[in-house]
Amino acid sequence: MKIIQASVAAPEANVGIVIARFNNFINNSLLDGAIDALKRIGQVKDENITIIWVPGAYELPLAARILTNSGKYDAIVVLGTVIRGGTDHFKYVAGEASSSIANLAITSEVPVTFGILTTENIEQAIERAGTKKGNKGTEAALTALEMINVLKAIKF
Ligand code: INI
């Protein structure tokens, strides 16, 4: 039996973080959580982390794709917050962002992790941005670190 499991230490990794400005009072906490996880847990060097701001969650996949295409990054962490409003806008923004990001990871073979909150209201978003329900940015960064090492172990 062969079992492959990876650690989250990736001291030589280059990581891109793509983050939306829309709802940035929440996204800044996701970013803090992601950077903390990359540096403190993953041992990623400060100079090997690149942060790209875009207007909203809808724009995240395009910027992430430019980064995966560049060949310079071992993983991309995507951060944003989509909060349900009075119309269907939420559905299109969140749906497009999530399916495009999933698709990008598969087609590029670069881990692109999903740190986008999709919530009913601001309170739920705050709970998931470093308060009682954890920090989705931290989670997305840890997942990126583990996937960097998983891919290293399974790629020939
Ligand atoms: N962008 C977000 O990141 N979160 C939202 O909650 C949101 N809502 O609800 O409208 C949002 N809209 C902007 C969108 O991402 C694009 O920037 C815009 O549609 C222009 O393409």
Image (cartoon, rainbow, N blue to C red):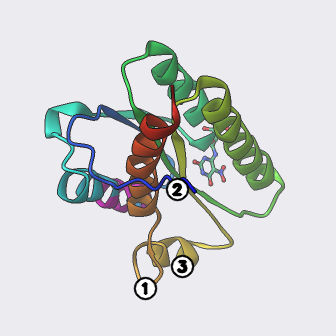
Give neighbour class at mark 2: few <14, some 14-19, many 20+ (Cα, 10 Å): few
How far apart marks 1 and 3 lie (CA) works out to 11 Å
User: What is the secondary structure assignment of the residue under circle 3?
Assistant: helix
Queried on whether the Cβ of the residue with tag 2 lies below 8 angstroms from ligand 1, the answer reads no
Given the current orientation, which residue lies at the most extreme bottom position? 132
- Residue 30, compared with residue 108, is above or below; it is below
Decide if residue 54 is on the left or right side of residue 92.
left
Q: Nearer the viewer, residue 34 or 22?
A: 34
Which mark, residue 132? 1
Residue type indicated by callout 1: Lys
Q: Residue at x 43, y 85 (%)?
A: 132
Residue 108 appears left or right of 7: right
134, above or below 143, in the image: below
Residue 74 lies in the magenta stretch: no
Name the magenta segment's main secondary structure: helix
Ligand 1 within 8 Å of disc 3? The answer is no
Q: Which residues are magenta?
A: 26-33
Q: Secondary structure at mark 2?
A: loop
Q: Position of residue 77 (x, y in %)?
A: 45, 43
Q: Name which quarter of the figure residue 107 lies in.
A: top right
Q: Amino acid at mark 2?
A: Ile
Q: Residue at x 63, y 73 (%)?
A: 121
Residue 37 versus residue 127 in the image, above or below: above
Residue highlighted by disc 3 = 123
- Say which of marks 1 and 3 sits in front: 1
Mark 2 — residue?
3
Q: Amino acid at mark 3?
A: Glu
Q: Mark 2 or mark 3, which is nearer the start of the sequence?
A: 2
